[in-house]
Amino acid sequence: VQLRSADLAALDRRRRAALVNSLTGFKSANLVGTSDGMGRSNLAIMSSLVHLGSSPALFGLVLRPDSVERHTLDNIRRTGVYSVNHVHEGIVAAAHQTAARYPREISEFAATGLTEHWVEDFDAPLVAEAAVRLGLALRDEISLEINGTRLLIGEVCYVDVPDRALAADGSLDVGAAGSVALAGLDRYYRTSLYKRMAYAKPDLPPREIAER
Amino acid sequence: VQLRSADLAALDRRRRAALVNSLTGFKSANLVGTSDGMGRSNLAIMSSLVHLGSSPALFGLVLRPDSVERHTLDNIRRTGVYSVNHVHEGIVAAAHQTAARYPREISEFAATGLTEHWVEDFDAPLVAEAAVRLGLALRDEISLEINGTRLLIGEVCYVDVPDRALAADGSLDVGAAGSVALAGLDRYYRTSLYKRMAYAKPDLPPREIAER
C-alpha cells in the first residue's frame, strides 16, 4: 500500500501510531533504570537509544515528557545517571510490563518481579536478570522544539557484558548475548546471525567475515 | 567483563569503536537515498534512525559530517528530502557496500547495483529492490555541540509497504516484510517473531497477543 501525507493525517490516531512506530525498522529493547536519590527506583522500557559517538562513548535517548517516561526524566535530572539493560527472551514479559502507568511511589522493579542490581559509585539500579548492563552519566539535555520531545545525551561510564559474546575485535555480538530486537510498539523478535560484512572499500567487492 | 570509564578510554580506537557501536543493541538497517538536484544520486546505509513522534510522523537521523555521510547531508540540505529504505536479506551485501568512501561523482546506486526508483513530486531516489520505502521531508537540523554530530528531523510524507506485512491494527510487521536487524558496525541478523505483547496496564499481568 502507498500513503502520502494526507493519507497519514487521515488515519485515526491509534492506527497512525501503530504504523508510524513500526516504520523505522528494528530497534533495541532496553530497560532504563533510575533512582530518585531517596530510595525510590524506577524502571522503564525504551526503544529510542541511538549511538552518537565512540570517543567519548555517547548515546542519545529520546524521551516524551508527557508519558510514563516522566518519572525517568525527573530521576535522571536529579541524580545525573541512568542504567541501560538489554532485554532478553527470559524477561520480555516483565520488561514490557514496565510500560504500564504505575504511580510514582510504585517501583517497576517490585511490580514486575525484576531485581535491582547496584554497583559501587553509581546511583542508579541496574537489572540483575540482564546479561548486558550499562551505566550512563547525563552530559546534555536537548529540547526538540518541533514536538516537545527531549534528547538526553549520556556518556557510557560502566559496561558489564558476557565474555562469551565478545568477539576477537572487541565487538559484542548482541545476538549471542541473547538480546531481543523490538519493532513497533509491541513485537519482540529472536535473531540469528545472517552475515557479518567486512569493512567496505570502493575498490573491493563486498566480502563476508566468516565468524562461525 | 566489566569496564569503567578509564578502561574504555584505555582501549585502542578501533576496539573501542567496535565495542561501543554494539552496546546500544539491535538497530534498523536503512538505505538513505538523496539527490543533489542536478542528476547525481547518493545512497548510504545508516543505522541511526529514531522515532520522535507519530502525529505528525517525525523521525530523527544522526549524521556525522566528517564521514561518508557528508554527501548525504549536502544533498538533504539542497533538496530538503531523503528516502529511507529497509535493508532485507537479498540486498545486505550491496547495502553494506554503500558505506565505502566513493568519490562524490560516483553514485552508490551504480556502484553497488541497486536501482533508483522515483515517485512523483519527491526529489530523492528510493530503492527499487526494497520492500519498505519511505519519503521524508527535512523539518529541522540540530547540531549536537558535544561531539559535532547532526540530528536531522524529518517528517514522513510518503510510505510504501507490502500489504502482506500489514496487521489488522494498522501496524507493519517488519519481520514479515523481510527487513533485517543490524548490530554494531557489521552484523546483520535474520529475525523471527518471539512474542507480541498487549498494551501494558498496571492492574493486569503481561498478556501476549496471539498473532500467528
Image: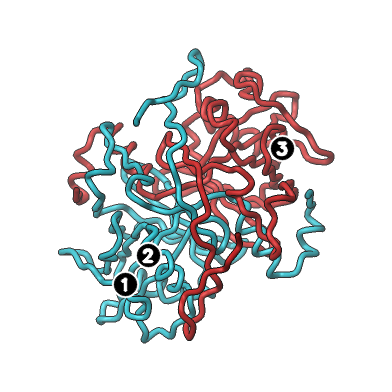
Chain colours: A red, B cyan
Residue A16 at x, y = what percent? 29, 38
**Proximity of marks 2 and 1: CB atoms separated by less than 8 Å:** yes
Q: Which residue is mark 3?
A: A79
Which of the chains bears the disc numbered 2?
B
C-alpha gap between disc 2 and disc 1: 8 Å
Which chain is home to disc 3? A
Give x and y (percent) for residue B131.
Answer: 29, 56
Say which mark, if any, is on residue A203: none
Q: Residue at x 68, y 59 (%)?
A: A167
Say whether mark 3 and mark 1 are on the same chain: no
Q: Is residue B17 left or right of residue B148?
A: right
Q: Which residue is mark 1?
A: B114
Q: Which residue lies most toward the left here? A: B120
Q: Kindly report the distance in space between the C-alpha atoms of the residues bearing marks 1 and 3.
A: 49 Å
Q: Amino acid at mark 2?
A: Ile
In-image side of A10 versus A27 (left or right): left
Is the residue under label 3 in contact with that under label 2 (CB below 8 Å)? no
- Front: mark 2 or 3: 2
Name above or below for residue A194 compared with residue A113. below
Residue A122 point in image, percent of width and height: 78, 40
* In this picture, residue A146 sits left or right of residue A172: left
Name the residue nearer the viewer: A76 or B134. B134
Front-most of residues B143 and B98: B98
Label 2 sits on residue: B91
